[in-house]
Image (cartoon, rainbow, N blue to C red):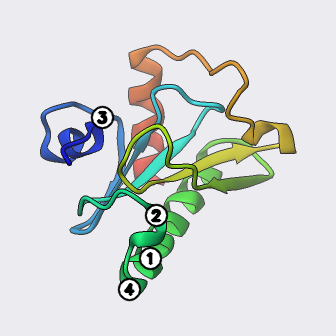
Amino acid sequence: MATIFSKIISGEIPCYKVAENDQFLAFLDILPVAKGHCLVIPKKEVDYYFDLDAQMMTDINLFAKEVAIKIKKVVPCIKVGVAVIGLEVPHAHIHLVPMNSVGDLNFTKERVKMTPEQFEALASEIAKA
């Protein structure tokens, strides 16, 4: 089921990595709905989030919590919102989106534009937080 996320995990496609361990990877979404929007993915290829086994579901959420704490330290926001959509890429993933209003978690709005340099700097800041 090699997806774009599988290619990111293998290093075939670069990403703006913010966190990684042996099971999971977190990186900036390149079409963010808000500055700091990150994706958290399992390294194991599983299409549907609710097909993750109980332990992996627990572990990915604990990993996502660590990433959300880092995002909140770097990106001014009231909270970091969580969304599991899974229609655009057939690989389980969690969206973490800095929020100052409910509308910030709207995936139909125009995406934030950032340069590669801005992505690199932000990923580095979040990773260091």
Q: Which residue is mark 4?
A: 55
Looking at the image, which is closer to me, 14 or 70?
14
The answer to which of marks 3 and 4 sits earlier in the sequence is 3
Q: Nearer the viewer, residue 57 or 70?
A: 57
Q: Who comes first in sequence, dot 1 or dot 2?
A: 2
User: Residue at horizontal 14%, vertical 39%?
Assistant: 11
Assign a secondary structure to mark 1.
helix
The relative height of residue 101 versus residue 93 in the rendered view (above or below) is: above
Q: CA distance from mark 2 to mark 3?
A: 21 Å
For the residue carrying disc 1, how many other residues have a C-alpha within 10 Å: few (<14), some (14-19), or many (20+)?
some
Give neighbour class at mark 2: few <14, some 14-19, many 20+ (Cα, 10 Å): some
88 horizontally vs 81: left or right: left
Q: Secondary structure beneath disc 3? A: loop
Q: Residue sitting at 83 percent across and 37 percent down? A: 103
Instruction: Please name the residue shown 51% across and 25% down the image.
Output: 31
Residue on which disc 3 sits: 15
C-alpha span from label 3 to label 4: 26 Å
The percent coordinates of residue 2 (x first, y second) are 18, 44
Dot in front, 4 or 2: 2
Which mark is first along the chain, 3 or 2? 3
How packed mark 3 is, by other alpha carbons closer than 10 Å (few <14, some 14-19, many 20 or more), is some
Amino acid type assigned to the residue bearing label 2 in the image: Tyr
Rounded to the nearest whole Å, what is the CA distance between mark 4 and mark 2? 13 Å
User: How many angstroms separate mark 1 from mark 2 (CA)?
Assistant: 8 Å
Task: Please tell me in which quadrant of the rendered image residue 105 appears.
Answer: top right
Label 3 or label 1, whichever lies nearer to me, is 1
Mark 3 / mark 1, whichever is N-terminal? 3
Percent from the top left, x then y, of residue 122? 48, 34
- Disc 3 residue type (three-letter): Cys
The amino acid at mark 1 is Met
Q: Which residue is mark 2?
A: 49
